[in-house]
Amino acid sequence: MKLQLTLDHGKYHEMIGLADVMADHVDVLEIGFPQVVTFGLGLVKEIRAAHPDLTLCVDCKVFHGGTGVTTRCFEAGADIVTVLSGAPDPVIAKMVEKAHGYGGKVMCDMAATPRTTGKRTAEVDQLGVDYVMVPSGFIPEYDYDLETHRRWFSPKIRPLDLAKVAKRNMRNARLALGTGINEGNIREVMGLDPEIIMVGRAIFDTDDRVMAADRMRRYLPFEG
């Protein structure tokens, strides 16, 4: 079980400094989609150059043109690249082929297809993705469709229930969980035995980020 720190906010120099501080306290550092859009892959290149052994996830949320985007991400230093579950099958298949050619991995973000989580998980698993990421639902954005203001699914079904459905439909991929995870709910998240637990503001918004990360890591099984 791995702790992934998501960097979605902050200025360029802050991201570089935070990577320097946190490199030894998390297992995976994610360059979030807002940062990829704002700063481009130069940020990934600089962090990779400074931390050659740190696992980097680039959350570029590919939907089309997967081969070119994936190539650029891995050449910049990514270890993991994300794709939206709503992307066409050929795009995902090409991404997987390209990623594995670089010795990297593909994470499929299921936020794009919440109503068909089980079916789509089985499909992307067969396409060869390495991780399936299901939003935990601990923040409202992942409970509601922000445009229609309607629930994605029945109020009796929580996003974590969808994570259970996703896991039942995996054969080779591993589960990743993110959004709104903190010390108050991490035990519930761990009950699903994810390979990756993604944490953002619960670390980023604290006064002592190293301490916050170390506290989160104490919940994870020891892998000595």
Image (cartoon, rainbow, N blue to C red):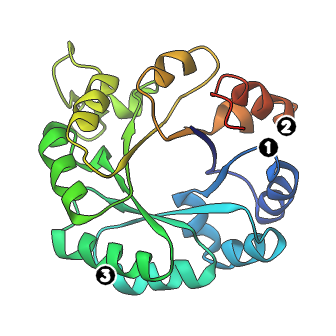
Does residue 131 sit above or below 39 in this rendering? above
Residue where numbered disc 1 is placed: 25
Residue where numbered disc 2 is placed: 210
Mark 3–mark 2 CB contact (< 8 Å): no
**In the rendered view, does 176 fall on the left or right side of 181?**
left
Q: Earlier in the sequence, mark 3 or mark 2?
A: 3
Q: Report the residue at 58% width, 85% height from top.
A: 75
Viewer-nearest of discs 2 and 1: 1
Quadrant of residue 148 within the rendered picture: top left
Rendered image: mark on residue 65: 3
Q: Report the residue at 53% width, 78% height from top.
A: 73
Q: CA distance from mark 3 to mark 2?
A: 37 Å
Quadrant of residue 219 within the rendered picture: top right
Mark 2–mark 1 CB contact (< 8 Å): yes
Q: Type of residue at label 2?
A: Val
Q: CA distance from mark 1 to mark 3?
A: 34 Å
Does residue 220 sit above or below 75 in this rendering? above
**In the rendered view, does 190 fall on the left or right side of 64?**
right
Q: Earlier in the sequence, mark 1 or mark 3?
A: 1
Where in the figure is residue 5, as x and y percent of width and height? 65, 45
Viewer-nearest of discs 3 and 2: 2
Q: Type of residue at label 3?
A: Gly
Where in the figure is residue 211, as x and y percent of width and height? 85, 30
Q: Earlier in the sequence, mark 2 or mark 1?
A: 1
